[in-house]
Image (spheres, coloured by chain):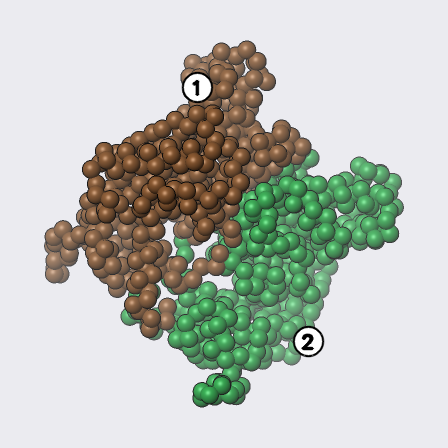
Chain colours: A brown, B green
Amino acid sequence: MKRTSRDIRTANRYEVLRQIIAASPTSRQELAAATGLSLATVATLVGELLDLRMITEVGFEDSAGGRPRGLVAVNASGGALIGVDIAETYVHVELFDLALNVLARAEEDVRPGESLPEQVVAHVASAVGSVVAQAGVEGSRVLGVGVSVPGQVDRATGTSEYAPNWDWHEVPLLDLLTEHIAYPLYLDNPLRASAVAELWFGAARGRGDAVVVNLGTGVGAGLVLGGALHRGVSNSAGEWGHTTIVLDGRLCRCGRNGCVEAYVGASGIMLTLRELSADSALLHPEDQTATIAALARGVEAGDPVALKALRDTVRYLGAGIADLVNLFNPEVVVLSSWVATALGEPLVAQVREAVARHALPRPMAATEIVLSPIPTDPVCLGAATFALEGALRSVGQRQHKRSRTAPPS
Amino acid sequence: MKRTSRDIRTANRYEVLRQIIAASPTSRQELAAATGLSLATVATLVGELLDLRMITEVGFEDSAGGRPRGLVAVNASGGALIGVDIAETYVHVELFDLALNVLARAEEDVRPGESLPEQVVAHVASAVGSVVAQAGVEGSRVLGVGVSVPGQVDRATGTSEYAPNWDWHEVPLLDLLTEHIAYPLYLDNPLRASAVAELWFGAARGRGDAVVVNLGTGVGAGLVLGGALHRGVSNSAGEWGHTTIVLDGRLCRCGRNGCVEAYVGASGIMLTLRELSADSALLHPEDQTATIAALARGVEAGDPVALKALRDTVRYLGAGIADLVNLFNPEVVVLSSWVATALGEPLVAQVREAVARHALPRPMAATEIVLSPIPTDPVCLGAATFALEGALRSVGQRQHKRSRTAPPS
Ligand SMILES: [Zn+2]
Ligand SMILES: [Zn+2]
């Protein structure tokens, strides 16, 4: 989408709050230095955040020879945010304070038979009720609930356009959730949730261009370009899992052949293991999590089948990530989601080597490849961040209406 | 790179001039409506462009019931811009007025033996001298010279980091050119030149997200994201030609295997033809241009080898462009450069079908696939546009210094 001056004002508001959350307490002068914004812009944005009680004044510090500088800090108890990670086999919900500390967690299993939207919605409603009760927060203090659902999502209408795991098509998910949940709701998918988590709190913070590679049951890339999430014209950018790495190769669950996901997603890795050794002790049929955990232990123990399965997976993954490096020329590639977490440093080390073999030298030289540094579920954190951004955006709209005669920017 | 408020001011200045060039004469009110900027912002930017004599006041129009509105138009004779397209086998130079009309052209052949930077630079200097003399413009009126050279380019230092056709490494091209050319020089590569040409004057005008696919001897993608060129952190984004489409496939001239360029670049297409029929009359050994022209005629005449070669090429091209659609979710994919021009509508029609088979339905539904509508050499036009942008940027910097106390944006 085309970016307007108003988008930039919103992005600046995000960036100032991001910086305050990262480094409380802090002064307007430090914020201006850290964000590159003018002191006047920072003062305006800090004023807005104080009005919202998202931050508070917390005293003064002496400045060398000048008058004391006012300090501000995030007002952790100024509101609560909820992040919902709907995945293939579970619904995971976390409630955060405004400093993005986790105050409560709930997890519900989604069993293989439970593929109806109503069944999944009931799990979400129950888990959201649970975290609010556990944390003891008043409903009026919940600023919003961000919901991540796999697949293609229309944010504007709150529709799950296509969710491959349950074969959902055009499910009006937000309408269904609204019947159970009274807080403002924001729908998006795990690619964008994990990207926004890295942008606010992880390896993409302060970076212009970053690619967040999600390795789980599904595979995809969250894109941070020009310091903001790249959504594309219909919010479906980042479908790297369904780009072709082997023309006419393995059948993918999307119905096409040779997709990256068919080789490096959890079921692709299981198929590789089965092809190497059909009776491998590493294989737990029908259980991706147990299989990937066994693979990780096998790699650590030097099991030859495990080592070969990892090497084969990295052959595809390295070429696929090199494509992202060549196309986007990012500062950092972040490996995220549960398969990346489970396989950890041995995976990252091999990926770095394989990408260096495939990518062009100039973009390669500018790119770091790292594991996500976010210690909790990045999808829950990112979903909660969508709720935070939603709250900041609606403020912006009120601001905008008040100041119709804004000077040219 | 991270985008700042100042980048947005520069982008707004570009957009207002772009709109004036597209629709002269026009009023400030029409400009505000067309660009989505406030009338106050437009008035400021129009004032800057008038000061620069890039545009002029050209009278008034009556507005219904109100006072007459001042009209402005591009001042075509307010300056000259030069675009230089250094390609594998030729140097093509065009001189433009400020309405981007071509006033003079020069072309020099670069022979296979002439691979030294000094030899190429001599051709550029001679052709630039020629267009200035032909057009009869005073040197002081040349605002700048944009130079496009294939491969990886460091704009900031004016270095050709790597040009595969001549095996150049770290050639200080702008320094060499400065010895012969006294005008401001701007270096970049054909991917970005053709993308900026589409953004200002072609199929990406007014679009947020567009991908300009270059099909020539080299292959790559110019990226327009968020209404501006995406360069990546080291100006090397868009290397789609060297993304993997067939793991362990054909050897590419970059030294890797299975790259898109190895199948859909001019030499890739020649190899496909040779594999289909080693003694095909379509093949002109060592002459890519003649071979692609013969292929285009063969397709039109219904020659079975030509039809099969086109179909095979589109198999790879369709999958590769589908990858771009899945990753970027653009509004438009523009096919540009000489191979696309030569193969024309039969190519585009087949590409549309093949991409639809490979891409996911949601991003596919949002994407148009078109041939570049630019009637002249888009790389020359884009290179000249870089010179225009350079002139507008330096203005911006002077402006910026004058208005240090700008209000928060
Ligand atoms: Zn697929
Ligand atoms: Zn290559």
Q: Neighbour class for label 2 at 10 Å: few (<14), some, many (≥20)? A: some
Is residue B120 shown to the viewer in this render?
A: no
Residue A150: x and y in percent read: 46, 37
* Label 1: element kind: helix
Task: Give the residue displayed 54% in from the left and 32% down from the top.
Answer: A261
Residue B134: which numbered mark, if any? 2
Residue B8 falls left or right of residue B373 = left
Return the residue nearer the eye: B133 or A181: A181
Residue B260: which numbered mark, if any? none
Residue B261: quarter of image: top right
Task: Give the residue displayed 21% in from the left and 41% down from the top.
Answer: A137
Count of numbered circles in the view: 2
Return the residue nearer the eye: B70 or A373: B70
Residue A290: which numbered mark, if any? 1
* Label 2: element kind: helix
Return the residue nearer the eye: B332 or A211: B332
Label 1 lies in ligand 1 vicinity (Cβ under 8 Å): no
Residue A259: x and y in percent read: 59, 34
Residue A26: x and y in percent read: 20, 50
Residue B247: x and y in percent read: 63, 32
Task: Give the residue displayed 59% in from the left and 18% down from the top.
Answer: A275
